[in-house]
Amino acid sequence: MRVPIKSKYTSVVITIGIFVTLVVIGSFAYDNFFGAQNLVNLLIDNSFLIIVALGETLVIISGGIDLSVGSIIAFVSMLAAYLLTTLHYNPVLVMLIALAVGGVVGLLHGILITYFNVQPFIATLAGMFLTRGLSYVISTDTISISNPLFVAISEYRMPFLFDSFLSVGVIVTLFMLLVFIYIAHYTRFGRAIYAIGSNEQSARLMGLPVNRTKVLVYVLSGFTSSVGGLVFSFYMLSGYGSHATGLELDAIAGTVVGGTLMTGGVGFVIGTVFGVLIEGIIQTFINFQGDLNSWWTRIAIAVLLLIFIGVQRILMARRDQKKSVKRVETIERAANAD
């Protein structure tokens, strides 16, 4: 039976289908793969990446891109480690400072892109170099975090279903996911993001606050990078300038595999979550196999990206074709009416 699915949901449905298929394949191929804790570990190991990818998703939907997210994570983790271990700051104050850092960087990106017409690629590339460089200015060595509060947060485990447990990172990730679903689909701000990504000029003619929305999108992306940086600090209990190298590419890949169009205007944050989890489950396959190089994960993601880009092009072509047909039918009806 053919089940009708709106075209805008097709990519998300495909992403979720691929994830479920991979879980089923892994369950038959490897013992204990389908264990509750093993599946929860996907969220634990990728919690910071999911958080970052949520912000990246809104940026891409708006028609932009943010290349600084991985470097902000490195800077936040290094800054937190330095303030805690070397300067012995209060851990709560450190968390607040860390959260503010990403928002400030995002604000700079938004101002450059919106009011100075700097291309998002260039503006966020500059932000990437800046924050990565500041990480090494603090220290070129690893700084361990031994603060009791950070250690307690890192070691906390909340009981979950079937004798599994959740970490603080997963709890934060689930909370952020709910917030982003609400922002993207139930607020004027979210609708403005989609409108700008579809056609910025039309959004301006509709009277939408385009400039303010674009700036806030990058502030939000920077903030989520800071949150991801804190979660990463809890996960690693250390700061290092080379942390999260290339993570911005993983975030973009997860977003695209999750069904978000790089041209903007189309995408769902829930799809991004499954896109990141697909990356994680491929890595889990490699770990269970034991004799494969970890770089096979990159190869698999590259194949998936090519597939999804192809699917997106097909969907866009069909959508444009339908619009053309409707336009012709409208013109014909008008001509017949005359």
Image (spheres, helix red, strand yellow):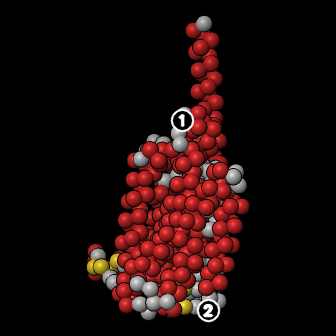
Element type at mark 2: loop
Q: Quadrant of the N terminus?
A: top left
Describe the element under mark 1 as helix, strand or loop. loop
Point 47% across, 87% down: residue: 84
Look at the picture and state if 179 lies above or below 147: above
Which amino acid is tagged 2? Asp
Q: Quadrant of the C terminus?
A: top right
Pick whichever, 188 or 298, lies toward us.
Answer: 188
- Horizontally, residue 13 falls left or right of residue 70, namely left
Where in the figure is residue 130, as x and y percent of width and height? 67, 73
What residue is drawn where x is 69% and y is 67%?
Answer: 126
Is residue 308 in view from this perspective? no
Figure disc tally = 2
User: In terms of image quadrants, where is residue 107?
Assistant: bottom right
Residue identified by numbered label 1: 207
Nearer-the-camera pick, 72 or 8: 72
Cα–Cα span, label 1 and label 2? 51 Å
Residue 92, quarter of picture: bottom left
- Taking the spot 56% from the left edge, 54% from the top edge, the residue there is 215
Question: Of residues 255 and 274, which is closer to you in this image?
Answer: 255
- Horizontal side, residue 45 vs residue 301: left or right: left
Query: Would residue 102 be visible to someone looking at this image?
Result: yes
Q: Where residue 90 sits in the image (x, y, percent)?
A: 40, 84
